[in-house]
Amino acid sequence: MRVLVTAGPTREALDPVRYLTNRSSGKMGYAMAAAFAEAGHRVLLISGPTQLDVPDGVDFLPIETAQEMYEAVQRHIGRMDAAVFAAAVADYRAATVSEQKIKKAGEILTLELVKTPDTLGSVRGEFGFTGTLVGFAAETQNLEVNAREKLKRKGCDLVIANDVSKPGIGFDSDRNEVLMVFPEHTEALPEDEKHHLAPRLVREIETIAAARQSS
């Protein structure tokens, strides 16, 4: 298969020295890209800024902002058989970016934020992608409910959800504990190293892709 994987955070500039971002390390997405490559698939990894080494055998496209992620996916997804969206993309960016460093003044600073483009939400409709689509959901409450709503709203075949409020898993960690939410059922995977979970998730995605092709 030809597989697109997104990973890492995005950065949305406020001024020349500051930006809005999140705690995503990119480790789960990079582990997924590595596992796909090790299973013999052709992989394009589109990643926001991380401190990680690019896995062997993976094509790499670095981006920084949500808009750049959107444009990169739009440009490349048409030639893919499967796409896995593990990146933590900013939902909002600054309405205006100051050309100069914002100086300290007063007790309160108000920022006006506007929505960024919804990359995963554009894949089925706007981008016309008909391959296997997998999303990730990092939640702090109502894990299965929120993941299933995302599965339906975004047109995914699978959503891989994790509770990032739990200490020791998720953001910044080498370990994760995930819930695989399918259209008809849900399956929990026990806590493990991300590089151990990734091959298990890849096998599930391979099964989904094979079923789509035969139907």
Image (cartoon, grey):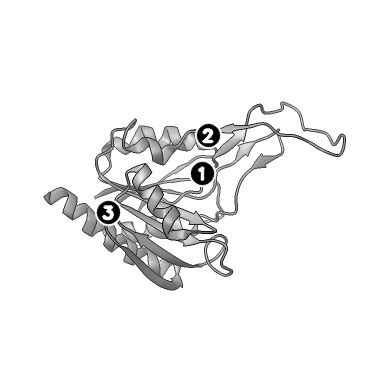
Q: Which mark is residue 116?
A: 2
Q: Visible in this render: residue 32?
A: yes
Residue 69 rendering spot, x and y as whole percentages: 47, 38
Up-down relation of residue 165 to residue 54 (above or below)? below
Residue at 25% over, 45% down:
81
Callout 2 environment at 10 Å: few (<14), some (14 to 19), or many (20+)? Answer: some
- Residue that appears at 51% across and 67% down: 174
Q: Secondary structure at mark 3?
A: loop
Q: Is residue 181 above or below residue 13?
A: below
- The amino acid beneath tag 3 is His
Q: Report if the CB atoms under discs 2 and 1 are less than 8 Å apart.
A: yes
Give whichever of discs 3 and 2 has the lower sequence position. 3
Helix, strand or loop status at disc 2 = loop
Image spot of residue 205 (x, y percent): 28, 57
**Whole-Å distance between the Cαs marked 3 and 2?**
31 Å
Q: Quadrant of residue 122?
A: top left
Tell me, for residue 89, which label it has, or none. Answer: 1
Question: Which residue is identified by label 3?
Answer: 41
Label 3 crowd bin: few (<14), some (14–19), many (20+), radius 10 Å = some
The answer to whether the residues at label 3 and label 1 have Cβ atoms under 8 Å apart is no
Q: Amino acid at mark 2?
A: Thr
